[in-house]
Image (tube, rainbow, N blue to C red):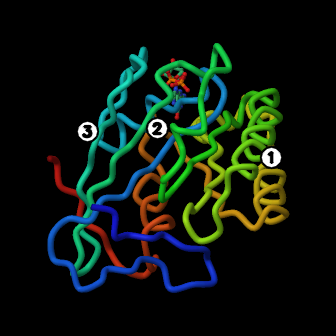
Amino acid sequence: MSEVRVRGRAETGLKFHGETRALRVKMVLLGSSGVGKSSLALRFSKDEFKASAPTVGCAYLTQVVCLHDATLRFEIWDTAGQEKYHSVTPLYYRGAHAALVVYDITKRESFIRAQLWLKELEKQYIPGETEVVLVGNKMDLPDDREVSLQEGRSLAERGGLLFMETSAKSGEQMNELLLTIGSNPEHKIRIMQL
Ligand code: GDP
């Protein structure tokens, strides 16, 4: 089942097609090793943070989000550390409704790598299919910041992407991120553990 199409900002957001059951949203995490992809996945799915977050592995985590009258089942895919070996294949992100390209705001190198990921995604991009969000993680470490908020925002604007800074550690901006992906930010969301 894949009725959901998460579209660009200019469009209305989610199409529910009158469904009442949970609609599947495939969300993939991309970015350099150490930026916090597994931690973001863990925060999304279990609302937890572990200092040594194990990379999720080849499976995915899930989270059900109720957005007003619709129920979305997010499937959150982690790269399982494959980025270290440059072996993330397009199959991983093909068919994704949302792709989070993550960098660490305290590591400029990861911001540069994020730009390469964006180029990679662009090659595979099917207009209207994937909502791409540039995510600057670790916003709880302002003293170590190497990439300014404005730099992140400008990069996203240049590519017509959504943008958000987050902290998997404190949980800041995590619900907002789901809302940004899924729907109208004026609606409150209720997150339920599976
Ligand atoms: P991945 O390799 O991209 O999956 O990154 P991990 O999720 O394994 O995180 C790498 C390291 O960064 C771990 O030590 C995490 O505890 C830490 N980390 C992840 N997210 C955050 C965050 O938002 N804030 C802080 N301070 N540390 C984080």
Label of residue 46 in the image: 3
The x, y position of residue 13, in whole percent, is 48, 78
Contact, CB < 8 Å: mark 2 with mark 1? no
Q: Secondary structure beneath disc 2? A: loop
- Quarter-of-image position of residue 132: bottom right
> Ligand 1 near label 2 (Cβ, under 8 Å)?
yes
Report the number of discs: 3
What amino acid type is highlighted by mark number 3?
Answer: Lys
Please determine whether, in this image, residue 164 is positioned above or below residue 11: above
2 or 1: tag closer to the N-terminus: 1
Disc 2 or 3, which lies upstream in sequence?
3
- The one of 65 and 174 positioned closer to us in this rendering: 65
Identify the secondary structure beneath mark 1.
loop
* Marker disc for residue 168: 2
> What residue did someone put label 1 on?
148
Residue 149 sits above or below residue 190 on the image: above
Say which element carries label 3.
Answer: helix
Instruction: Report the Cα–Cα distance between label 3 and label 1.
Output: 29 Å
62 vs 36, left or right, is left
Question: How far is disc 2 from disc 3 in space, using C-alphas?
Answer: 11 Å
